[in-house]
Structures are given as C-alpha cells and as structure tokens.
C-alpha cells in the first residue's frame, strides 16, 4: 500500500465566532401563508411582489424534494426561521455601523478590502443590508449598485419586475419556490451600455442568528458592450441547528457585454447551501464564472449559463474542497441555443477526511446551435481512502454540426511529485500542501489577489496535519 | 499536349490571413527530379500543401497547371486522381483504418477499377519487403503509434503503390536513422527509375539526394524563389547553408 | 391476445437531474400469451439492464441455459434469429472454470445467415402482430480464478427490429474478460431503418487482479436507436478496466451512452479508463453521453475522455490527398470504427468470419 498522510480537521477558529442575539425581530418558525404575508408587509412590497411571494409559496408546497443528489433530510423546514433582522438601519458610512457587527466584518477583512479601493461594498447581515457604499467614480459612470429591496420602489422598478425570477422561475425546483416566497435582501446592479467598470464590485453575506436562513437575491444586468467583474464571498459561524442558504443569482449579459462572476463560498459546516445561479448571454456576450466551494455541510450548486445569442461564450473555472462531514455536490450547466457559441469548463475537486465531493454537469447543444464548441475538463484528487469523489457529467447534443470534447481524471497525489519536492528540501506535509495548492491554481489565478490569498489560506488550513 | 508536367506561375498563398508565398514560378518536366531548399519558415511546406490543395491555405494569386490542366481551384481528391502525390512531413493518425485498407481503397479510387485482393496483396507485400517493413504492418492502423521514421516509410509505401506522376516529398528524410534513410532513398529511387515519374523533394538536409540525379535546385527564402541552379547548387547549400541569401 | 408491457431498463447507478431523462430508459416489450412454461427463478448474477429486465424474463418464464466451459470445451457459439413478428428470448449462463480460456460468440441478427459450427436453436414465440422481430438475450458469465474469456456479441437488427442485449459478468481472482460489441447496422436488409438496440453490461471485478476490456463499434443508420449502459465495478485490489466505444451517427439516429467506472473501497491499485468517440455524419442526430466515475478509494487511477464531432479536417484532407472523395473518406472512417473492433478479436477464424459477414468480403 502506498504511503498516506493523516490530516487533522480544518482549523475553523478564524470563522467560528458568534454573538449573543439581542432583541431581534423574529417570525414564527415554520412556513405558512401568514409568515409570508408578514415578511411582505415588513418590507413594504409593491403589490406585484406580494402576489409573487404567495404564488411561490403555493408552488413550494406542491413540489417534491429532489430524488437525486445529496440527502437534505437533516433540514427541517419547520425549524428554520426564515427571517431575522438586526436592529440597525441602513448605513452609508462604516463608522456608523454598530461595533458588534463591525467586528465580525473586520475579522473577515472587509475594511482592508475597502482600503484597497474596491468600488463598493454591500454587506448583508442577517437578511438585511447593513452597510452600503457605492464609490463615487462608479456612480458617475451611471452604474447602479443598490440593495434590491429599496430598488423595488425606485426608478428601476419596472426593469426589476421584467427580470425578477424570470431566469430562475419558482417552478424550477422546490428551493427556488421557497426563495420566491421568502427572499430577503441582496443586490441589484445595472451597468449601462458601453461602461467598463474598472474595479470589481463585491458583496459579503453573513449569517449569525441561530437557525436563520439566508435568501438573498442578486440581480445583475450588464447592458450592451459593458464590462463588469462582480465578487461574491461569504462566511458564517458554526451552530448546532441546521442553517439553510437558498439564495438566487440572476445574471443578464446583453449583446457584446462581458460579466465575470467570482465566488468563494465558505459557509460553516452545518449549512445547507442550496443556491441557484443562472446567466443568460446574448449575441457576442461573454460570461465568466470563477468559483471556489469550501464550506457548508451540504451543498447543491450548479451555476447555469444559457447561450442564447450567436457567438455567445461561457467560461467556467471552479474548485471544490470537501472535508470531514461535508457532502458538496457542485458542478455547472450550459445550454448552447445559438450558432457559433462556445463554452469551456474546467473544474478541480478534492476530497479528504471522509468528505464527499460530487461533480455534476450538463452540456446541452440544441439543434439551433450549429458550429457550437464545448469542452469540459474535470480533475479529482483523493487524499485518503475514507473520502469519496464522484464525477457525473452529461452531454446532450442535437446537431451533428458541433464539436465537443470532454475529459475527466481521478487520482491521488503522485508519489514522484512528493519525492521530487522533498529532494528539494520540503517536508512531506509541505510537499503535499504545495501540490494541492498547485492543483487549485487554475482557480486562484483567476481571483483578485486578496481572494487568492484567502483561498490559499483555506487550502493550507485544510491540509494541515501530521504524517502517520 | 504540354511538355511540362507541373507549371506554377505567380503563385501567391495566404495562411491565417497572412501571405506566405509571394509569387512563385516553378516548372517541372516529366521524369525530372527537382529539389526545393530553404531555411525554416521559408514556406516550403506551404508550397507543398498549396499544391495539394490544403483547405487552410488560400490561393490569392497565380495559377497551377498540372499535365496541361488548370488545377488551381480543383479539389484535393481530384488532384490526387490527376496524378499528384504529397508525402507529408507529419502524417496524421487515422484510427480504425489499416494501412492496407487505405492503400487499396485509394488505388481503386485512382484507377476507378476494382482491384483483386490476391493481386493487391502480392504487390503490397513486394513493396513492403523492399522497404524492409514487416508484413503485419499492413494491418496496423494508419500512423497510430507509429514513430516518425515509421510514418515516413508508410508514406513511401503509399507512393510506390499508388504510382503518381509527380510526387512531392516534404522533409521525408528528416528524423530518420541512417538505415531508414537508405531504405527510403531506395524506395524513392525505385519510384522514378522508369524515367517518366517526377519528383519535387523538399528538404533542408538532403541526405536523400545522395543516390538521385538532381535536375534542378530551387531555393526558397521568405516565400520567394531567390535562386535556381543544378545539382551543384544543392550540394553547395548543403555545405555552406543559406547565409549567402541573408539580407546584408 | 397479445399485450405489451412497459419496462424500465438501463438505469444509471447514480441518478442525476430528472430533466435530462438520462437516469434510465423505458421500452415497450411484447408479452405473448404463452411463451415458455418454465417457472424456475431468474438467475441472480446482476447484469446491466436492471430489475426491469428481470421482471420481464420472469413474466415470460425464460429458462436459464447453463453451460460449463472448461479447458477442454472452451467455446460456445450461437445465433439468435427471430423472424419478423416473432420474439426470441434467451438467457445463457456460463461457468468458466478455473484456468480455462473460453470464447463465447452470440450473434443477434434477425435477417442474417448461418454462423459456423454449434449454431444453437432459436426459441420462438407466436406471431406478435408486430412489424419487427424482437430479440432479448441475457448473457451471464461467472469467471473462476484465472479464467479468461473472449465475449463477442454482434447486434445487427433489420428494419424496425428490436434487440435487447443484457450481460452480467462476475470475475474472480486473476480472471480476465475481453468483450467485443459490434453494432454494424443491418446485415440483411438494405435499409435497416428504425431499428432499436438496447445494450447493457455490468461487470463486477471481484477478485484481485481481474480485468475487463470492452471494445465497441457502431454505425447507426437512419432513424435508429442505440441505448447503452455499461458498468464496471472495481471491488478488489489491482483490477483493471478499459472501455473503448466508437461509432458514427446518420440521419435521425439517436444514441445514448452511459458508462460507469466505480472504484469501491478496497480496490486499491486499480485502474479504469473509458473512451468514447462519435462521428457525426448528418446534422439531424441526437447524441447523449454520460460517463460516470465513482470513487471511494484513494489509490486508483481513473480517466475518461469523450469526443464528438464531424470528420476532422486533417483526416479528411489526408484521405482526399490519396484520391478518395468526401463520401468515400467518410465511409472508410466509419467502417474503420467497426473494423477496428473486429480486428482486435484474438481468434483468427472468428475475426475473419466477422469481417466477411460485416464487410462482405475478405480483407487483407
């Protein structure tokens, strides 16, 4: 038998902190019509949104839970409190934010990021946007970056109404319907035609209260010829009670526009992360996904791209790291529905300490997509013999005038590589960490520096252990 | 009928939108052995492939006449059936198709006539023995797992079996060991031994020329023919290289 | 008088999005009034089509035909040829004894001609009132220690025929099986349209060092369906698997390939590889592929590759430069896929017989 490294569990200290709850407003546990009405009235929903929530609730109650993928039996909807709101109003300046909440974000490094001239920071804390600051230069370009709830009453309400949950309708799956009924918080971004946003916009999410769910909704529209990079990164503390994240991200990339959507998901290890992300790309548009999935107890995450216009393109780079107690079912979906469209998918996954990592993908090429080209490459690394890694890719091609390539590989850390690094002075542990970091480099090099650093730190923490 | 077998006039060719050949004039008569030399990047392979009709190369000017016929716009397979052959520098793999199948099907396509298995097999093994190729190679998939030298031999086998009137050999002797060069040379020699077949040998080392009687040498530099001469020119270039053609 | 029953077959070992409709396939099968009177239970060696076919065979009362293959009696050959409107359902069980080397050849070609030696009788059913012939064959092979088997299965339906070919393999220590799946399009009818083939194989590599290699080649004619489910379970250390499936699709054809390599805990030192290559010869095709790798063991190597597209321009250019026109080049590449599988059969007589049968002439 080949040599093995026994690795300790991840050091979560950095993220496992919580605060005592203080007079926060809570709705009744469980999910019925009265709860949804309460949420709607609290938010001052316009009539159409009120009706939409109730219709979604009906759909939610009708739909069964999926019969494939990881088990979500540990999730008891009756015990999920869907809406918790901290007792501060929206704040434009960092200095006005309550200390307790500020400390949480400081530990996560938001002020530092602010200093490094990111365009704007929308930080979500327990279902509400607490802090929101849009940089002047971005404003001047005409870019709208605001919380979604207040935008429902603003000048962009018609635009939002035309787009909200059209890409991911409540009928899509049970947790999309749930989202439609109880969604709360999230961002709305509109980039006008021809505008290139030089600095990435970013948004943090935060979950604190015991048993609360996160249902934020992100809606981004990049108009013709515009260019945007949006970063989503998140973290949450650990609890005994299951936490649920059923967010929704809808991205519209118009003609010849470009959107890059980067995420590091680092939810704590009792979270159920059932997020839905979807992009619609018009003629000549380009959609780039960069995704690192590290946290949560159970994850179902399959960013989907629909290439609707001629020459639309999509590129996906992702990494998933499943450690002890984790069942991360992640992947990507793409639909080619126009000629000369291209997609390229590259994913890596790592399984360790009994973690389960599943890569699940779907490439669909319709009869309309003549001369489409698609390529998929997924690599999996097994770090021990108690973990699991499954690869479930699928391709459905309905035109003979297309070109498709797919490859997948699974294996262990190469002994020769470890030997080589040791012959250059590294310890076995360091050698393995270096190899795994190198394995993840395809994603880290696509991220802004501070994110890449956070990601490499996460990897190093996960890999730390002793040789046995 | 025209005396000249191949006549290229003012040929210009683009690859990826960039002009590689800037107006080539070249004539080859029947039974003649010509050599095309030039430094790397001169456009030698481009010329060979443009003559064969490679779809990636676009002819933007000039004409190619073969056996008196204008083939500038003709399809690849028609040029082959007219009697043109190109031995590729790096022949591609064709999984699932055996060497024997390919040659037999090609031979039938060229002559338009059915070829009887027994006759074909006899002739094939004759040529294979001559080229010192093991007979079981006939059943191997074309170029799959072949080394560079093995691929070249397979090309020459096709040459001997298909008997074109003009064969363009693109760097056929590169990457071969001494024995293989000797064998390939013998094959090429056998091909034109009847005095009626023509050869255009593209090379920059020309070990293959040692056994052949070269009628004319053409030097291609940066997409243009900069010099022409007889066998002596080839010999002197092999000795001195292309420095004399470099811009001062 | 005659009923049909809807059967779910070819299930994926791990389900995925239902919308893709790839988790399994369903097919209508005839249930004639009386088929066979036998009541004996269906054999328990698992095969690739799943419970759906178990139930169907039980309904029909198909009797398992047991065969022992030893060092002395090492080959078995059978052709199953129902006529139009007939159903032929057979279940073969092979016990390949320790150290034996055996050859098993099963031809499912309703319109074909005789195959040499040992041609066994068909089972027949009454006229089903259907257009095409229905063939359902299950082949179960148990390989003892160090046994070795070459399994050749030829599937050649004529117009509107339906073939179900289900195989199950259990391999003990050191056992080795080489499977050749040939789907040449129809051999008898000139126009084998609307034919449907469901092919499945499940192999449990249960003994240390056991191995499976599968080579398949197909040509799907107009409006034909080929639906496959290949599963290899690596259960023991140092096992090896190798799946190579290549084919071509013509107008209106529909192909589904499910290929699973499963490295279970305890299969350290094992290797599995899967390769699929599809050639499109028409725009109007449906090509679905779902190559799974499941893994719970660290010390393994698994990889799969799938490619689909039209003839590569380089290959086309090369063949045209040898005088073939586009159609001839396409046909040569197509046939090459199937010929490649046949040529890999070690037994010369079988190889030559099949080449003759499929391509109609002797090859060099």
Image (cartoon, coloured by chain):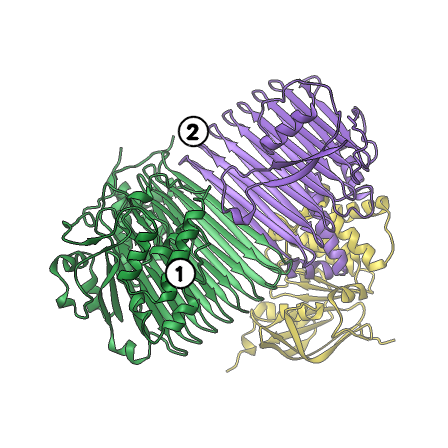
Chain colours: A green, B yellow, C purple
Residue under pointer 2: C266
Q: Is residue B183 left or right of residue A34?
A: right
Residue lying farthest to the front in this orientation: A34
Front-most of A393 and A429? Answer: A393
Which residue occupies 27% across, 71% down? A119
The reply to whether residue B160 is visible in this rendering is yes
**A440 versus A252 height, above or below:** above
Q: Give the quadrant of residue A123.
A: bottom left
Q: How crowded is the residue under tag 1: few (<14 C-alpha within 10 Å), some, or many (20+)?
A: some
Q: Give the quadrant of residue A74.
A: top left
Q: How crowded is the residue under tag 2: few (<14 C-alpha within 10 Å), some, or many (20+)?
A: some
Label count reads 2
Front-most of A418 and A135? Answer: A135
Q: Position of residue C325 (x, y in %)?
A: 76, 61
Report the chain holding disc 2: C
Residue under pointer 1: A52
């Amino acid at each position: 038998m080949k040599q093995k490294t026994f690795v300790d569990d991840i050091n979560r200290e950095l993220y496992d902190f919580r605060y005592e709850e203080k007079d926060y407003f809570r709705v009744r546990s469980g999910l019925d019509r009265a709860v949804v009405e309460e949420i709607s009235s609290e938010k001052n929903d316009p009539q159409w949104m009120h009706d939409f929530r109730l219709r979604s609730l009906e759909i939610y109650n009708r739909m069964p839970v999926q019969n494939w993928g990881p088990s979500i039996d540990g999730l008891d909807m009756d015990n999920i409190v869907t809406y918790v709101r901290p007792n501060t109003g929206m704040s434009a300046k960092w200095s006005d934010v309550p200390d307790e909440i500020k400390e949480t974000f400081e530990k996560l490094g938001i002020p530092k990021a602010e200093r490094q001239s990111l365009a704007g920071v929308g930080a979500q804390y327990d279902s509400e946007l607490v802090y929101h600051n849009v940089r002047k230069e971005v404003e001047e370009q005409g870019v709208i970056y605001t919380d979604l709830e207040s935008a429902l009453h603003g000048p962009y309400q018609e635009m939002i109404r035309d787009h909200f949950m059209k890409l991911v309708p409540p009928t899509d799956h049970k947790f999309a319907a749930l989202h439609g009924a109880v969604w709360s918080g999230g961002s709305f971004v509109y980039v006008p035609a021809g505008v290139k946003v030089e600095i990435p916009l970013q948004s943090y999410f935060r979950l604190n209260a015991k048993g609360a769910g996160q249902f934020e909704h992100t809606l981004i529209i990049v108009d013709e010829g515009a260019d945007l990079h949006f970063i989503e990164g998140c973290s949450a503390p650990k609890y005994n009670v299951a936490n649920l994240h059923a967010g929704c991200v809808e991205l519209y990339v118009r003609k010849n526009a470009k959107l890059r959507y980067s995420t590091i998901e680092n939810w704590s290890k009792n979270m159920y992360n059932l997020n839905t992300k979807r992009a619609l790309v018009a003629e000549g548009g380009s959609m780039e996904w960069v995704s690192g999935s590290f946290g949560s107890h159970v994850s179902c995450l399959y960013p989907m791209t629909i290439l609707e216009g001629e020459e639309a393109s999509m590129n996906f780079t992702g990494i998933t790291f499943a450690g002890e107690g984790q069942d991360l079912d992640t992947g990507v979906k793409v639909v080619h529905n126009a000629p000369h469209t291209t997609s390229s998918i590259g994913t890596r996954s790592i399984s360790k300490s009994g973690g389960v990592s599943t890569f699940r993908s779907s490439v669909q090429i319709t009869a309309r997509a003549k001369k489409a080209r698609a390529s998929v490459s997924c690599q999996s690394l097994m770090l021990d013999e108690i973990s699991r890694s499954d690869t479930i890719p699928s391709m459905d091609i309905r035109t003979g005038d297309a070109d498709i390539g797919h490859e997948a590989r699974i294996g262990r850390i190469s002994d020769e590589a470890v030997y080589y690094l040791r012959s250059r002075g590294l310890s076995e542990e360091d050698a393995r960490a270096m190899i795994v970091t190198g394995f993840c480099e395809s994603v880290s090099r696509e991220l802004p520096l501070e994110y890449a650093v956070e990601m490499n730190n996460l990897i190093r923490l996960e890999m730390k252990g002793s040789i046995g | 009928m025209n005396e000249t077998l191949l006549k290229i006039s003012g040929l210009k060719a683009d690859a990826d939108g960039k002009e590689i050949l800037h107006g080539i004039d070249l004539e080859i008569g029947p039974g003649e052995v010509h050599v095309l030399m030039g430094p790397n990047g001169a456009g030698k392979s481009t010329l060979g492939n443009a003559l064969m009709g490679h779809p990636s190369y676009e002819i933007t000017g000039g004409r190619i006449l073969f056996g008196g016929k204008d083939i500038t716009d003709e399809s690849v397979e028609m040029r082959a059936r007219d009697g043109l052959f190109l031995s590729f520098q790096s022949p591609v793999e064709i999984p699932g198709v055996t060497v024997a199948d390919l040659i037999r099907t090609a031979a039938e396509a060229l002559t338009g006539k059915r070829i009887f298995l027994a006759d074909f097999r006899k002739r094939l093994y004759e040529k294979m023995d001559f080229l010192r190729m093991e007979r079981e190679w006939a059943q191997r998939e074309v170029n799959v797992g072949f080394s560079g030298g093995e691929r070249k031999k397979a090309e020459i086998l096709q040459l001997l079996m298909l008997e074109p009137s003009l064969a363009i050999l693109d760097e056929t002797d590169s990457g071969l060991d001494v024995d293989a060069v000797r064998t390939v040379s013998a094959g090429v020699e056998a091909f034109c031994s009847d005095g009626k077949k023509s050869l255009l040998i593209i090379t920059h080392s020309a070990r293959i020329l040692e056994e052949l009687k070269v009628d004319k040498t053409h030097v291609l530099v940066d997409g243009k023919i900069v010099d022409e001469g007889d066998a002596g020119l080839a010999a002197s270039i092999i000795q001195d290289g292309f420095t004399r053609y470099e811009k001062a | 008088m005659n009923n049909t029953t809807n059967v779910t077959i070819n299930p994926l070992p791990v389900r995925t999005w239902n919308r893709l409709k790839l988790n399994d396939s369903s097919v209508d099968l005839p249930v004639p009034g009386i088929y066979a009177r036998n009541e004996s239970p269906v054999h328990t060696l698992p095969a690739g089509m799943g419970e759906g076919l178990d139930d169907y065979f039980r309904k029909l009362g198909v009797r398992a035909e047991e065969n022992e293959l030893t060092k002395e009696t090492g080959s078995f050959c059978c052709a199953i040829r129902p006529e139009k409107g007939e159903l032929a359902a057979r279940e073969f069980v092979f016990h390949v004894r320790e150290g034996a080397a055996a050859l098993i050849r099963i031809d499912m070609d309703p319109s074909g001609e005789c195959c040499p030696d040992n041609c066994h009788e068909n089972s027949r059913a009454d006229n089903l009132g259907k257009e095409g012939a229905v063939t359902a064959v299950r082949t179960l092979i148990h390989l003892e220690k160090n046994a070795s088997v070459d399994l050749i299965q030829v599937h050649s339906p004529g117009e509107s025929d339906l073939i179900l070919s289900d195989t199950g393999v259990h391999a003990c220590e050191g056992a080795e099986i080489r499977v050749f799946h040939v789907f040449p399009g129809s051999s008898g009818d000139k126009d084998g349209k609307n034919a449907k083939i469901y092919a499945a194989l499940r192999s449990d590599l249960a003994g240390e060092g056991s191995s499976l290699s599968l080579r398949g080649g197909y040509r799907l004619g107009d409006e034909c369906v080929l639906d496959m489910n290949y599963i290899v379970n690596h259960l023991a250390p140092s096992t090896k698997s190798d799946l190579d499936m290549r084919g071509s699709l013509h107008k209106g054809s529909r192909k589904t390939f499910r290929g699973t390599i499963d490295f279970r805990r305890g299969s350290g030192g094992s290797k599995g590889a899967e390769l699929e290559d599809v050639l499109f010869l028409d725009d109007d095709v449906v090509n679905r592929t779902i190559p799974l790798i499941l893994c719970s063991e660290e010390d393994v190597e698994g990889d799969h590759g799938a490619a689909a597209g039209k003839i590569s321009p380089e290959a086309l250019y090369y063949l045209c430069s040898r005088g073939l026109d586009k159609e001839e080049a396409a046909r040569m590449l197509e046939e090459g896929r199937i010929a490649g599988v046949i040529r890999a059969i070690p037994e010369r007589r079988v190889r030559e017989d099949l080449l003759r049968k499929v391509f109609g002439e002797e090859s060099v």
